[in-house]
Image (tube, rainbow, N blue to C red):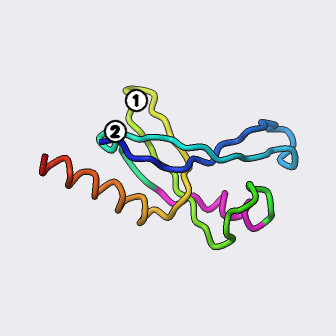
Amino acid sequence: MIIKFVEVYESTRSHSNDKRRSYSLREVYVNPEQVVCVRTDDSLKTKLLEGKMPEGLDGRQDFSRIYLNRGQVGLDLVVVGSAATIEQKLNISQKQLLKG
């Protein structure tokens, strides 16, 4: 089963000047069997409070980084939601897989 999350991604990259960076939201679908780790991402919470994130996000919103297995390389995504919320969505999916 694939799970839908809302990813926060950098839509404008400028490593030399943090003020030019802009962020956007998009849907992303994750296979829970590929998830290696989920961690809270406080850096985006700070950017949200500074007004650097897309409009419409509540100032109380949390962000998490999901690490996915891609062989030797790996991939990580920043998604909207606390680590506990992400873990709960992943566990519900795993329970459904086991029952099937």
Residue found 73% across the figure and 47% down from its top: 23
| Label 1 Cα neighbours within 10 Å, binned few <14 / some 14-19 / many ≥20 | few
Residue 17 located left or right of residue 1? right
| Residue 90 vertical position relative to residue 35 in the rendered view, above or below | below
Residue 54 position in % (x across, y down): 74, 54
| Residue 40 vertical position relative to residue 58 in the rendered view, above or below | above
Per the image, the residue denoted by label 2 is 34
Residue found 75% across the figure and 68% down from its top: 49
The quarter of the picture where the N terminus appears is top left
Per the image, the residue denoted by label 1 is 70
Mark 2: amino acid: Gln
Residue 41 located left or right of residue 24? left
Q: CA distance from mark 1 to mark 2?
A: 8 Å
Contact? badges 1 and 2 (CB < 8 Å): yes
Residue found 60% across the figure and 43% down from its top: 26
Q: Which residues are magenta?
A: 39-49
Residue found 19% across the figure and 47% down from its top: 97
Is 67 contained in the magenta span? no
Residue 92 located left or right of residue 85? left
Residue 45 position in % (x across, y down): 66, 63
Mark 1: amino acid: Arg
